[in-house]
Image: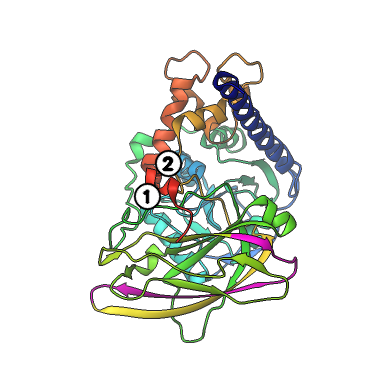
Amino acid sequence: MNFKRWMAFSLILGLSAQNLHAQKMQEREEEFLKTRPLVGDPLPDVTVHSPDGRPFETAGLRSHYTVLTFGCLTCPPSMWNIAGLEAVHQDYGPKGVKFYFIYKSLAHPELAGDYVQPFTLDERLAHARQAEKQLGTRIPWIVDAMDNRLKRALGDRPNSQFLVNPEGIVVRKRAWSHPGQVRKDLEELVGPVEHVTTVEELRLERGLPLKAPAARGVVPRLARPQMMPVAMEPKIESDGMPFFAKLRAEADADLLKSGRGQLYLGFHLDPFQKAKWNNLTKPLSFKIEAADGLKLDPAAATAAEVAATSDCDPREFLLNVAAWPKGQPLRLSVTYFACVGEESCHAVRQEYVLHRERDIDGGGARGEGAGYWDAEEFTARMLAGDRNKDGKLAKNETVGILLPHFEKLDVNDNGFLEAEELDVVADWLNHHHQPGTPTADAAKSTGR
C-alpha cells in the first residue's frame, strides 16, 4: 500500500471511530432517558452524606422544588456548567427552590490537580469540601456513599440532572447539566424573575487545584493504550497508615474479555495526602503473588531511580498478561517511601486485590498524558455528530458538553458550530484541568 493510500485508509478509519463514538454517546443519552427513575416517577429514597459526614436523606426533599446535579472535581461538563447553575440558584433560591450538587466517584482521575479516586468516605468528603473551594460554589454539596448508591439509583451518569417537584416526583431529567434549560423549567413551574442574574454578576471566587509538594514532569509519563479500570480492593489496615500513593489499575478490552492482554499499573500520589516520593531511598517496587493459571510479565518490578531528591510524578508499569483466569483474584503488594513535609518520612507497604472485571465507577483517564485534549482530535469527535455532513454542527446535532454553551461558542452567530469554534473547547479543557501533557519521551516508555 503506497503512502497516499495508507493515509486515506487511516483517515477513513479515524472518521469511522469518531462516528462510532458520537453514535454511542447519542445512544447512551437516549438509554439514560429510558432508565428509571423516569419523569413522573418518585425520587428514590436514598441515604447519603452531607459534607461533614452527617446522614442526608433524599426522602427529605419534599415541600419545594429541588434541582439535583451530579459532579466532581474532574468532570468537564460539571466544571463548565457550575457557574451557570449558580446564576439560576441566585434567582430561584429566594423563591424556595433548593439546589444541590452531588459529589460522586471521579469521572476522569488525574485531571485538574492529578486527583485520584478516594478509597474511604472521609477522603470523598474531603474531595467535596475542596470542590466547594476550588469551584467557588454556593450551592451546597451532598456526598454519595462509597458504594455510589445514589448515582446507581438515578441512572449511573457522571453529570446527570434532575428536577423534583414538592411531592417528590421527578418532573425533568437530562443526561448532562444544562443551566439554560433549568432556568426555562423553573420559569415554567415557579414563574419568571424580575432580573436574570448573569454569570459575570456572580463574581464567584474560584480557587486552584491542590498544589503538589514537589515537582511534576520529572519522570516521563507512560504512553498507555486506551484502557478501562479494573475492580480492586485496597487492603486498609487498622494501623491507619494512609495510602499516600493510590493504585490505578487498567486493562485493555482483550484482557477483560479473554484474560490475555495488557495491564497498566500506575501508583499516583494523592494530592490530599500532601506527600512526595523520597528518591534518596529505594524506588517503589511491586510484586504480584503467584496464583493458579496466572501468567504475566513482569510479576515484580522496581521503578527507575530518579536523580531529583523528590518528585510527585506517578510510577507506572505496563504488564503483558498471557493468562488471567476469570474468578482468580490478583494479589499485589507495593512498597515505597513517601515524605510529608521535610521531616516526616514513611516506609510504606500496602496490598491490593484486583479482579478481572471492569470497575464501572472507576472513571476514565484521558489521553497518554492523562487528561490532555488534542484540539484536532476533540473537534473531529464533536463533528462526528454532523448528521447531514455539511462540516458543521447545528444545535440539533450537538450533544454533551457543547450543548449548554452552543450560543456562546457560536461566535459568528450563524447558528452553527464550525471547526475553528470547536478548537477553543480543547484549549479551555486543558487550561482548567491542568493535564499531564504527553511528551516525546513518554511515547517511548513501556514501563519501568
Going from N to C along the chain, the mark reached first, 2 or 1, is: 2
Q: Which residue is mark 1?
A: 136
The residue type indicated by label 1 comes to Gly
Q: Is residue 195 above or below residue 226?
A: above
Q: Are marks 2 and 1 in contact (CB under 8 Å)?
A: yes
Give left or right: position of 437 versus 105: left
The residue type indicated by label 2 comes to Ala
Q: Residue furthest front?
A: 1
Which is the main secondary structure of the residues drawn in magenta? strand
Q: Residue at x 31, y 58 (%)?
A: 211
Which region of the structure is painted magenta? 320-342
Q: Secondary structure at mark 1?
A: loop
Q: Is residue 58 visible?
A: no
In magenta segment, residue 354:
no
Q: Position of residue 387 (x, y in %)?
A: 66, 20
In magenta segment, residue 329:
yes
Q: Which residue is mark 2?
A: 83
Spatial separation of the CA atoms under disc 2 and disc 1: 8 Å
Q: Position of residue 195 (x, y in %)?
A: 42, 31
Q: Position of residue 100 (x, y in %)?
A: 52, 52
**10 Å neighbourhood of mark 2: few (<14), some, or many (≥20)?**
many
Q: Nearer the viewer, residue 287 or 169?
A: 287
Give left or right: position of 351 versus 270: right
Q: Residue furthest left?
A: 342
- The dot on residue 249 is none
Where, quadrant-wise, is the C terminus in this rendering?
bottom left
Q: Is residue 102 visible?
A: yes
Q: Nearer the viewer, residue 411 or 354?
A: 354
**10 Å neighbourhood of mark 1: few (<14), some, or many (≥20)?**
some
